[in-house]
Image (tube, rainbow, N blue to C red):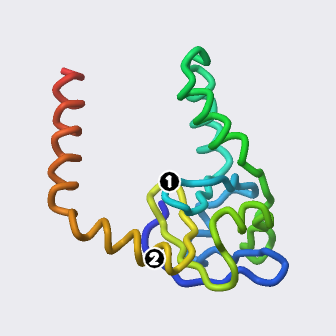
Amino acid sequence: MFLGSHEHTIDSKGRLTMPSKWRSELSQQVVVTLGLEGCLTIFPSNKFEEIAQDLDKQSSLLEETRNWMRYFLGNADMVDVDGQGRVLITQKLREAAGLNGNVVVLGLVSRIEVWNPEKHRANSEAAKSNIAATAQKIGQVERGVANANR
């Protein structure tokens, strides 16, 4: 399980060293893709495969589905995790997320987000300003799902 926030750097060759406590959770390959709000998202390859299979089952008749698949899957890159726990992030993905040097790495249970520090700060401040309402809304959604499954 990936949890917590860490400050790391991407070296001049585009390699990001994963926090040591997460390395045992990573497979030998991970998938790096564009995330939402301007970050990158890293998935263990087995988790990404589950998500990709679920997306593939969606109707391609819907324009939104096609667009999401193009964005999420079309920008994905499967990469090896080297012996030092480093992941190579392509220049295209680094540029898309504004990553250069220092980054913030967040563990979000089954995935990892990689942020430009300024974007992360701005996103965190915006989220904090409405966190109580967000928590309440998520709770309502979860209760609705639980009730629907009864």
Q: Residues within 10 Å of mark 2 (few under 14, many from 20)?
A: some
- The kind of secondary structure element at disc 1 is loop
In the image shown, does 121 or 89 lie closer to the viewer? 121
Q: Please state, as top left, top right, bottom left or bottom right, where the C terminus lies in the image.
A: top left
Identify the residue position indicated by label 1 in the image: 110
- Name the kind of residue labelled 2 in the image: Ser
- Name the kind of residue labelled 1 in the image: Ser
In the image shown, does 59 or 129 lie closer to the viewer? 129
In the image shown, does 142 or 24 lie closer to the viewer? 142
45 relative to 119, above or below? above
Which numbered disc flags the more N-terminal residue, 2 or 1? Answer: 2
Q: Residues within 10 Å of mark 1 (few under 14, many from 20)?
A: some
Number of dots carrying numbers: 2
Image location (x, y in percent) of residue 75: 72, 47
In front: mark 2 or mark 1? 2
Identify the residue position indicated by label 2 in the image: 5
